[in-house]
Image: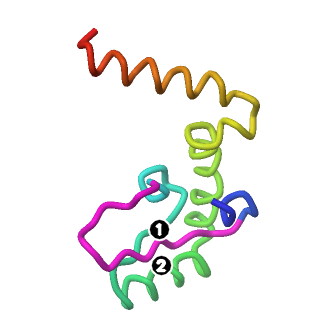
Amino acid sequence: IEALIAGRYLVMVNPTVLPEMIPYVEFGSALLAKDKDELTSALSMIIEDGGVRERLLSSRRRFYDYYLASLTGESVESVAELCEGMVKEKVGG
């Protein structure tokens, strides 16, 4: 999270079959590397491809809006929506 806030490019290294805990890649805020070759490729893309860099940086806003609403003063609303969704899931309505 700190790297995103600082405006850095992010490569998530996950050599396992386990899902990511925080979906940086799903939001387009990071590239995924599962091995050394993919890490080399991801770093090369960041260095050489301005379009990739632009996409990674612009995707931060969606990530912020979803996960870091507290930075925008909307944390109470986000927690309330989360709780409401959990209750609806439990009671079916």
Residue that label 1 marks: 31
Q: Residue at x 69, y 63 (%)?
A: 2
Which type of secondary structure does the marked residue at label 2 adopt? Answer: helix
The alpha-carbon separation of the residues under discs 1 and 2 comes to 6 Å
Q: Residue at x 62, y 51 (%)?
A: 60
Residue 92, quarter of the rendered image: top left
Q: Residue at x 33, y 15 (%)?
A: 88
- Decide: few, some or many residues near mark 2? Use Cα within 10 Å; few <14, some 14-19, many ≥20: many
- Decide: few, some or many residues near mark 1? Use Cα within 10 Å; few <14, some 14-19, many ≥20: many
Q: Main secondary structure of the magenta part?
A: loop
Foreground pick, 37 / 20: 20
Left or right? Give the position of 6 relative to 64. Answer: right
Q: Position of residue 9 (x, y in %)?
A: 63, 69
Left or right? Give the position of 89 relative to 64. Answer: left
Provide the residue span drawn in magenta: 8-22
Q: Are marks 1 and 2 in contact (CB under 8 Å)?
A: yes
Vertical side of 64 occupied by 53: above or below = below
Q: Position of residue 82 (x, y in %)?
A: 47, 27
Foreground pick, 8 / 21: 21
Residue 90 is a magenta residue:
no
Q: Residue furthest top?
A: 93
Three-letter amino acid code of the residue under disc 2? Ala
Q: Position of residue 3 (x, y in %)?
A: 67, 66
Checking the image for residue 91, the label placed there is: none
Residue 55, quarter of the rendered image: bottom right
Residue that label 2 marks: 42
Vertical side of 38 occupied by 77: above or below = above
Question: Could you tell me how many numbered marks the image carries?
Answer: 2
Q: Earlier in the sequence, mark 1 or mark 2?
A: 1
Q: Quadrant of the N terminus?
A: bottom right
Three-letter amino acid code of the residue under disc 1? Leu
Q: Position of residue 93 (x, y in %)?
A: 28, 9
